[in-house]
Image (cartoon, rainbow, N blue to C red):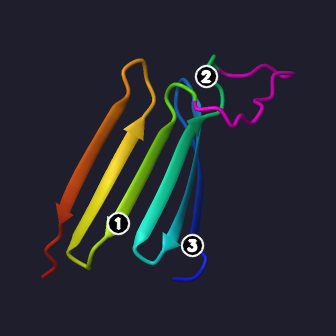
Amino acid sequence: SGNNTNQRLNQASEETKLSLGKYLTPNLYLQYKTSLNSAGLPGLGDIPKPSLSWESGDQLFLEYRINRNWSISTFYEKQENDKFKIDIKWRLNF
């Protein structure tokens, strides 16, 4: 449906994350999540600088809706040992 873009700032007790998501097609959704300050809360002069490198804790999520009841999603998170999972979801509406 048009230009659906999702942007959020999540404030956790220890870190701030930025989440960017977009429907690339009506059935394909892509989301990227990154930490804005991995070394704790920034001081007055310490403004986080955007980085294009893949950092530990960064996440990538992709979901493809096959039809209104079935979807396939995948999740990747960069850590010491990379985390990757694939889900197949079925939804029943009544």
Query: How many angstroms separate mark 3 from mark 2 (CA)?
Result: 29 Å
Q: Classify residue 54 as left or right of residue 43.
A: left
Q: Classify residue 11 as left or right of residue 88.
A: right
Res. 64 mark: 1
Q: Residue at x 17, y 70 (%)?
A: 91
From the top left corner, tell me how far across and down residue 42 is, in percent: 73, 22
Q: Disc 3 designates what residue?
A: 4
Q: Earlier in the sequence, mark 1 or mark 2?
A: 2
As helix, strand or loop, the secondary structure at mark 3 comes to loop
Q: Main secondary structure of the magenta part?
A: loop
Q: Earlier in the sequence, mark 1 or mark 3?
A: 3
As helix, strand or loop, the secondary structure at mark 2 comes to loop
Q: Residue at x 20, y 58 (%)?
A: 88
Q: Residue at x 75, y 30 (%)?
A: 48
Q: Disc 2 designates what residue?
A: 38
Q: Residue at x 41, y 55 (%)?
A: 62
Q: Residues within 10 Å of mark 1 (few under 14, many from 20)?
A: some
Q: Which amino acid, by three-letter code, is at mark 1?
A: Tyr
Q: Which amino acid, by three-letter code, is at mark 2?
A: Ser
